[in-house]
DNA sequence: ATGTTAAATAAACAAACGTTCATTTAATTA
DNA sequence: TAATTAAATGAACGTTTGTTTATTTAACAT
């Protein structure tokens, strides 16, 4: 056999990315073979190389695309002026975005060490850009005297960690709706920075 | 050559565990070969099998030992009666224990998916045992009317995530001492559950 | 001193790895 | 319709993988 009936390059390329994402998230980059990806795409291993230069590029592109899309999505949010409201906006944004893309989030945190140095630098830079968002919000709230924080940098990292942690236990059919989880986290985060919400959200 | 001068079984077994821990944490279980471990131990690959049945057992034992030691260490702490003080005790305990064993912590969170089903179940059970600690503290504080939480389960998971997250950015030579970091987190956590410390800690 | 056990070596195993290549066929363009 | 390009196949490449085995030697017990 050779080229199969009805095959289209763009479609295959897309499927490769989807499958790679799914498998990397499930088993880890190093534990997934190109043959395994090919099998799930429905193609022979060699065919993958018509669409990507190598395995490493597959991972790098997935991570870079995710981080860039995350930053772009935040860029399109309109921000309230009040730091407390900004913080709430960020909490909801982060939870919503991450729960919608659990696999991307997972590999972004798990597979950084499997990137070759140059690729790592690129992704790490995007990540720091994202970390700057809560850092700036907290710094603004602290400057304005609205927050009560001993250290805004540590607080930002702590908040990010707890927000991202949602993806480890959230189940679509679980006890709590996504909306409810957001509310719980908003309260938790707002209390942790030392403010209380005025109205009962 | 064969048995080398001065070789002792117990020593080698210990070194294998140490090296495996270090390499698994650095590169991930799947990315580390038995030959790589052997090289760092200073032995041929085949010799590893005098001390462990296979690679999977190496990982399982590391994770089981860590989780059991963690639970034992908590068991030896003496607990104050007041839930707020219990929470502070837990925060400091968790940070201290985890910052002292960054590699163990790392693989405990990263390599669960590389465990075969039976091994996974065992480790997961130990982990849930540990998660029950903050859950129970929060539930007690909430019952006593001292905490202000919308959901104690979610809060417990959030707090655990943010505490464990310390290991991702803490550097021994960094800006903040471990003591100072503990203090920051105690304030953050206490505020997040809805209490404020009486004295200025 | 001798016999036994423990702990290593070195070579080998089949299987799987990422990747390449010549070839074939479908889709597209002229 | 013919020529060209795109997208597959399937076999092969040389490595590397986890693990086993026969053999050798050091450590230990009698």
Image (tube, coloured by chain):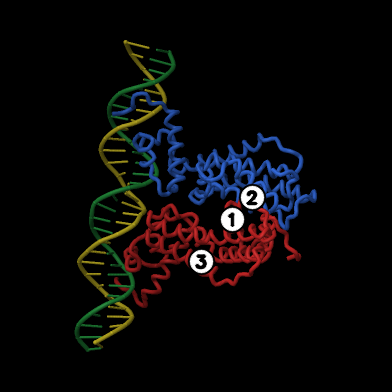
Chain colours: A red, B blue, C yellow, D green
Q: Earlier in the sequence, mark 3 or mark 2?
A: 3
Residue in front for this viewpoint, D16 or B137: B137
**Residue A84 screen position, x and y as percent:** 66, 63
Q: Check whether the beta carbons of the residues at disc 1 and disc 2 lie within 8 A of each other.
A: no
The residue wearing badge 2 is: A150
Q: Which mark is residue A71?
A: 3
Q: Residues within 10 Å of mark 2 (few under 14, many from 20)?
A: some
**Residue A101 screen position, x and y as percent:** 53, 65
Please state, as top left, top right, bottom left or bottom right, where the C terminus of chain B lies in the image: top right
In percent of the image, x 33 and y 64: which residue is there? Answer: A53
For the residues labelled 1 and 3, the Cα–Cα distance comes to 17 Å
Label 3 resides on the chain identified as A
Which type of secondary structure does the marked residue at label 2 adopt? loop
Residue in front for this viewpoint, A91 or B36: A91
Q: Earlier in the sequence, mark 1 or mark 2?
A: 2
Q: Quadrant of residue D10?
A: bottom left
Which type of secondary structure does the marked residue at label 1 adopt? helix
Q: Is residue A56 left or right of residue D24?
A: right
Please state, as top left, top right, bottom left or bottom right, where the N terminus of chain B lies in the image: top left
**Residue A26 screen position, x and y as percent:** 49, 57
Task: Relative to A162, say whether B88 is above or below.
Answer: above
The residue wearing badge 1 is: A156
Please indicate, yes or no, whether residue B154 appears anywhere in the rendered image: no
**Residue B97 screen position, x and y as percent:** 58, 40
For the residues labelled 3 and 2, the Cα–Cα distance comes to 28 Å
Q: Is residue A3 left or right of residue A37?
A: left
Which type of secondary structure does the marked residue at label 3 adopt? helix
Q: Residues within 10 Å of mark 1 (few under 14, many from 20)?
A: many
For the residues labelled 1 and 2, the Cα–Cα distance comes to 11 Å
Residue in front for this viewpoint, B169 or B125: B169
């Amino acid at each position: 056999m050779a080229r199969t009936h009805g095959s289209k390059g763009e479609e295959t390329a897309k499927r490769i990315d989807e499958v790679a994402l799914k498998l990397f998230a499930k088993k880890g980059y190093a534990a997934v073979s190109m043959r395994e990806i090919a099998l799930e795409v429905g193609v022979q291993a060699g065919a993958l190389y018509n669409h990507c230069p190598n395995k490493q590029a597959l991972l790098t592109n997935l991570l870079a695309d995710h981080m860039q899309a995350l930053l772009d999505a935040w860029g399109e949010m309109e921000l309230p002026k009040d730091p407390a409201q900004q913080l709430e906006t960020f909490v909801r944004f982060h939870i919503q975005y991450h729960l919608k893309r659990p696999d991307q989030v997972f590999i972004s945190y798990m597979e950084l060490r499997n990137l070759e140095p140059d690729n790592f630098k690129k992704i790490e830079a995007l990540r720091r850009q994202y970390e700057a968002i809560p850092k700036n919000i907290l710094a603004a709230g602290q400057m304005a005297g609205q927050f009560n924080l001993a250290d805004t940098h540590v607080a930002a990292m702590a908040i990010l960690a707890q927000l991202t942690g949602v993806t480890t236990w959230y189940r679509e059919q679980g006890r709590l709706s996504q909306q409810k989880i957001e509310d719980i986290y908003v309260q938790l985060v707002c209390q942790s920075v030392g403010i209380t919400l005025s109205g009962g959200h």
